[in-house]
Structures are given as C-alpha cells and as structure tokens.
C-alpha cells in the first residue's frame, strides 16, 4: 500500500461522501479506493468510516485523522511543486467560495486565463453570498465584500468596490424620484433588503459637509446578490450596488442612478483563509491571480496601513 495514495483516497471519500464519487474524481476504480481505505484502517487499527448501503459517514477518529491528512497532503504538494522545474506548475484541488455576482460577472469569465496559466489546479468553486464557516466546511479561502467580522482569519484586501444608488424606471414611475437620501426613511419609498453582510447595515452617504446614514424599509430582503439585483430590476425597491453590477443595466436604461451628487465609501473586498491552514503553492498563486484580476476591475483605493 502506498500510504499517500491511501490518504488521498480516504480524504476524497470524506469530501464526496461516496466511494464511487471519490473513485471518479481520482480516476480509479471503486474497488481500488475501497481497498486503499481498508488497508489504511488496518494499518491504523481504527475505523475511519462508517459505511451503510446509502451513504458513508466519517467517524470521530476519522474526522480528526482527516484534518491531519489535509495538512500532510498540502505539505507534500508544496514540497513537490517547490522543486526545480516544478515551481511554475502548482497543482491540486482548491476550494474557494465567492459572492454570486462577482463569480458571474468577473471571476468565471476570467477563469480561462487562470487555467491556461495553471492547468493542473482543480477549482471547486462555491458561489454564494451566505456566511461560510471556512474551517468547518474545509474551504481553502473565501472572497467577501465589506469589513471582515472574524478577526481570527488571515486576510488580504484585493479591491475596493465603488458603490452607487439605483432604481428601475418602473419603480420611479410608481414611487417618484427621491430628492434626498433621507427621503428613503419613513416614507412611501422602499429599498431591496439584503440579509447579513455589508448590505444589512446602514449606508453612510456624504455631500460636502453633510453626512447621513440610510437603511430604508423593504418589502423584500434576500441573501443572494443576483436575486438582490433582479429584485431591483423588477421594481421592488431601491438598490445600493457596486459599479460592476450596475454598469450594464445603467447603459441599457434598466436602472437609473440616484443621488449622483452624493458620495458613498467604497466597499472593501477581501480574500480570507484560516490562520492555521498551510498556504500551499496553489493557494498562493490563486491569491496573486485574483489580486491581479481585481486590480483591473476595482483596484484598492485605500491600502491598509503597514
């Protein structure tokens, strides 16, 4: 038994919850994966997995062993890619979670460039705006807008997203155009709400010496950026949007900019990862690549103080 092959097989079974799925991703037979895990259990003299006819669950010992296996495999990958002739070819599986609009409009269209540069990196891309538990969900890194609330994470600021306030023509025809941001509080006007994150808090707006914080009232609140935009386009309320989300719809006339003489602070964009997670070669090159990508779309305006 090759111990590292057995560790990889075990880790993939834990991640997929299935011997069959693990075999498919490893390009091995199900029998081979099963035998490797059985041999590993025999060597360790402990049961790592509970098997039923329907699913595979990791045992308590297996879960603890899995965390160590991840670090060992990451160290092995990094050692191999650091050798002469291999340093430019990082490889392996990378699990990343990004906001849905950023994935759809910026990240995914640019991925051919990433894979042309790093063809041996396999990306498992989670696309969501929910709060992801990086450690419990075993995600290598997340990209999030707004100030980070979990100060235990390692983070790099990769962009500053300019913001604006927008509404659809159908909304403005029905409710009228607000003349002042304060009109959005305690009136007939409505915003589209966003559950959690930066969009769940009041927005500070500035005009010369005047400043105001606006939150507004909503008839719909959502936890997904694409749904948030769709609700605004449908006339369900006023939106606060990063420029990259609004640009196409502003040009087509589907959205109208409001309060253009007011300024909003940009939304910082961070890439975060666990402080105790080994920063492998594949994670390092992804961080550098996405920093390059965001520098083209929304460069950091206010770099952190050193």
Image (spheres, rainbow, N blue to C red):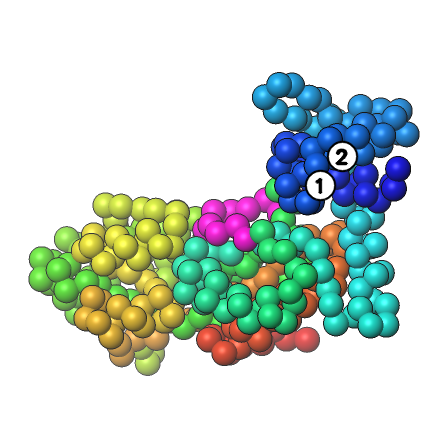
Main SS category, magenta section? loop
In the picture, residue 292 is in which quadrant? bottom right
Left or right of 67: which side holds 43?
right
Tell me the residue at 62%/52% (across/down): 95
Crowding around mark 1 (Cα neighbors within 10 Å: few <14, some 14 to 19, many 20+) is: few
Tell me where residue 302 appears, x and y as whole percent: 53, 77
- Is 219 situated above or below 42? below
Left or right of 220: which side holds 10?
right
Task: Say if the magenta span includes residue 189.
Answer: no
Tell me where residue 278 appears, x and y as whole percent: 76, 55
- Check the picture and name the quadrant holding the N terminus: top right
Tell me the residue at 22%/67% (across/down): 255
- Is 174 situated above or below 55? below
Residue at image mark 1 = 28
154 or 141: nearer the eye?
141
Tell me where residue 137 appears, x and y as whole percent: 61, 42
Magenta residues (range) = 125-135
155 or 207: nearer the eye?
155
**Mark 1: which secondary structure?**
loop
Crowding around mark 2 (Cα neighbors within 10 Å: few <14, some 14 to 19, many 20+) is: some
Can residue 118 be seen here? yes
Left or right of 216: which side holds 106?
right
- Is 112 situated above or below 1? below
122 or 48: nearer the eye?
122
Task: Say if the magenta span includes residue 131.
Answer: yes
Badge 1 vs badge 2, beta-carbon distance below 8 Å = yes
Tell me where residue 97 appears, x and y as whole percent: 55, 53
Residue at image mark 2 = 32
Can residue 206 be seen here? no
Q: Residue furthest top?
A: 53
């Amino acid at each position: 038994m090759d111990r590292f092959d057995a560790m990889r097989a075990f880790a993939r079974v834990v991640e997929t919850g299935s011997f069959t799925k693990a075999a498919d991703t490893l390009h091995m037979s199900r029998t081979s994966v099963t035998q490797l895990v059985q041999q590993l259990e025999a060597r360790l003299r402990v049961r790592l997995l509970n098997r039923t006819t329907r699913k595979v669950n990791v045992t308590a010992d297996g879960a603890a062993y899995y965390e160590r296996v991840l670090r060992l495999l990451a160290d092995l990958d990094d050692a191999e890619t650091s050798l002469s002739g291999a340093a430019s070819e990082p490889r392996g599986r990378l699990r990343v979670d990004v906001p849905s609009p950023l994935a759809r409009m910026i990240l995914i269209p640019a991925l051919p460039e990433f894979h042309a540069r790093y063809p041996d990196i396999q990306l498992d891309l989670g696309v969501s705006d929910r709060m992801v538990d990086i450690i419990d969900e075993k995600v290598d890194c997340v990209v999030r807008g707004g100030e980070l609330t979990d100060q235990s994470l390692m983070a790099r600021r990769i962009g500053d997203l300019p913001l604006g306030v927008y509404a659809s023509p159908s909304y403005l025809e029905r409710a009228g155009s607000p003349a002042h941001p304060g009109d959005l509080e305690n009136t007939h006007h409505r915003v589209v709400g966003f559950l959690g994150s930066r969009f769940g808090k009041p927005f500070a707006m500035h005009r010369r010496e005047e400043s105001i914080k606006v939150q507004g009232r909503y008839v719909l609140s959502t936890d997904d950026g694409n749904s948030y935009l769709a609700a605004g386009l449908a006339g369900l309320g006023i939106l606060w949007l990063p420029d990259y989300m609004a640009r196409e719809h502003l040009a087509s006339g589907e959205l109208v900019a409001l309060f253009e003489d007011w300024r909003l602070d940009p939304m910082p964009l961070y890439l975060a990862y666990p402080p105790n997670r080994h920063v492998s070669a594949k994670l390092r090159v992804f961080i550098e690549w996405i920093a390059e990508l965001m520098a083209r779309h929304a460069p950091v305006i206010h770099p952190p103080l050193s």
